[in-house]
Amino acid sequence: MALKFIKWIKDPIHGYIGLTQVELDLLSSPLLQRLRDIQQLSFVELVYPDARHNRLGHSLGVMHLAGRWAEFLQQNSKDIYTNKTINIRDKDVQHLRIAGLLHDIGHGPFSHASEFVLKSFIRWLKSINENSVHENFAERIICNNKIKKILEKYKIDVKKIISLIKGNSDPPFYGQIIKSVIDADKLDYLTRDSYHAGVPEYGTLDLLRVIFTSRIHNGNIVWFRKGLYAAESVILSKFFIYRAVYFHHTVRAAWAMCEHMLYFAFKENIISEKDFQIDKFYNVTDKFIIGKILMCKKKKSKAHWYLKQLLERNLPKCILENQEIRDNGIRQRFEKKINGIKDIESRLKVEKKLADILDCKTEEILLDSAILVPYPPPLSKELEPLIVEKEKENSKRLSECSRQIDALQGTITNDVRIYSCSDKKFEKDTVINSIKKLLKEI
């Protein structure tokens, strides 16, 4: 018996998306509604003007795709080789849809752009990996009375939802639908982000082909060979959209400005750890932070200065990228030092040293590091997607079937940039010499 949808939402990517009663109740909660005011791609709009979509639309999209995927596997639940049937219940489908709906509920203001700063000012986050900040917020929010009561009212397992969001389940394929190398999250954000940014060539995926050529083997999701190109396109699209959109040098300039703005907003007591308590979290949106800083009456507020530059699109210029350093030894040492910075205060100290060497004001020099691992390296903890033969028991890793994926495997895309807000013009050699001096001091 399929899930009963009582409401429909029209989505620009997936068409009509159905909602069950529990999903509608969750969607009506303030903690989920706040995602309307969290932009999916903070500051990408400064380069791609229509990329102003929000986290709520993405969450609905992931819910929809997770449900489609689970329903398809429910109808094709036999292990392709052992013929053993896996019992996928309607309740399991509902759990996966809810995990998709709630997977981004923990995002702070300005989405990922705030996570590096939040780790420095929210005590319980200090020991947490930066990449899982929003997941840990999500866990606390879901365990919060308001969300928890809704889930318990409909007999939804709260712990299972949290595990699914983290990609954990038994058998593994449930969690893989939500978080893995090829998952519902990527299928939605690659398609949605490229659509709104106006670059569909980077995210045109055959979503249903990815789902309909998948099956279950040994508890994991695998793909038939006829789905090779559909699976391959997800990895390649991720690589291209990160390079062209998320890691665009102007987008990253705004990202660095945002991190500095948030840092000084905390330091100047414009915002505090109390604002991020779970019972107040529904207030903390992009607009909330901007409003608090704009209302700040403190003279010479640095947070206000950085915000003003962002609002007026007066962004710093990139004066050097790591790829422009021809000396491999210097470049690698520079990358290692900058990538090794663990908190915003340490980065500010390095920026100050570099500003002094370049004879600039401290706030005029910004550093940024963006790292992408487009595909998990060999022996990674992430399970590499498997391509299987329909007629005989034979499976190969995706990288063994695709030259393009094999070329990407184990590679790391690392953009380390130095930005300047100064009117001074810098020669590349001058900046490179300043890096050599900097490396002697840090």
Image (cartoon, grey):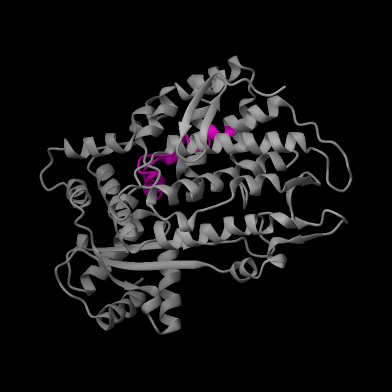
Q: Is residue 201 left or right of residue 402?
A: left
Left or right, 70 with respect to 46, comes to right
Give whichever of 92, 273 is nearer the camera.
Answer: 92
Q: Position of residue 5 (x, y in %)?
A: 58, 21
Residue drawn at x 69%, y 33% as measured from the top left: 71
Residue 163 appears in view: no
Foreground pick, 353 / 336: 336
* Residue sitting at x 41%, y 47%: 115
Residue for point 52% across, 44% down: 188
Query: In this image, 185 relative to 398: left or right?
Result: left
Q: Quadrant of the N terminus?
A: top right
Residue lying farthest front? 15
Viewer-closest of 290 and 360: 290
- Residue 54 sits in quarter: top left
The quarter of the rendered structure image containing the C terminus is bottom left
Q: Is residue 430 above or below residue 210?
A: below
Q: Which residues are magenta?
A: 99-123
* Figure quadrant of residue 361: bottom left
Q: Is residue 212 magenta?
A: no
Residue 256 horizontal/vertical position (percent) = 31, 56
Relative image position of residue 319 (x, y in whole percent): 27, 72
Q: Is residue 100 magenta?
A: yes
Residue 334 seen: yes
Q: Nearer the viewer, residue 41 or 201?
A: 201
> Percent x, y for residue 230?
63, 55
At x 70% / y 61%, what residue is drawn?
398
Taking 354 as reference, is 136 left or right?
Answer: right
- The image quadrant that residue 340 belongs to is bottom left
